[in-house]
Amino acid sequence: MAEAPIMPVLLFMLAILGFVALAYYLAWRNVRKISLAEVLRDDTMM
C-alpha cells in the first residue's frame, strides 16, 4: 500500500466525475427546455 499510486488514481477518478457531471449538465440543459406535459402527450422522444 505504501507504493500505491494514490495521486494518479485520484486524478483519474476526478476526471471521470468531471465528465459525468458535464454530461448531466448538458442533458439537463436540453431537458429543461421542453414541457413535460407535451412530452407525455406525444409518443416521440424530443
Image (cartoon, rainbow, N blue to C red):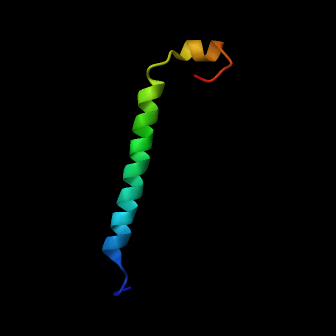
Q: Residue at x 44, y 42 (%)?
A: 23
Query: Could you say which quadrant of the image residue 25 lies in?
Result: top left
Residue reaching furthest to the bottom: 2
- How many numbered marks appear? 0
Could you say where residue 42 lies in the image, as x and y percent from the top left? 65, 14
Query: Could you say which quadrant of the image residue 2 lies in?
Result: bottom left
Query: Could you say which quadrant of the image residue 30 lies in?
Result: top left
User: Vertically, is 39 above or below 20?
Assistant: above
Could you say where residue 40 lies in the image, as x and y percent from the top left? 62, 17
User: Vertically, is 22 above or below 12?
Assistant: above
Could you say where residue 38 lies in the image, as x and y percent from the top left? 57, 12
Q: Residue at x 40, y 50 (%)?
A: 19
Could you say where residue 44 lies in the image, as x and y percent from the top left? 66, 20
Q: Residue at x 35, y 87 (%)?
A: 3
**Image quarter of the C terminus:** top right
On screen, residue 35 versus residue 22, left or right, reads right
**Image quarter of the N terminus:** bottom left
Q: Nearer the viewer, residue 40 or 12?
A: 12
Q: Residue at x 37, y 82 (%)?
A: 4
Residue reaching furthest to the left: 7
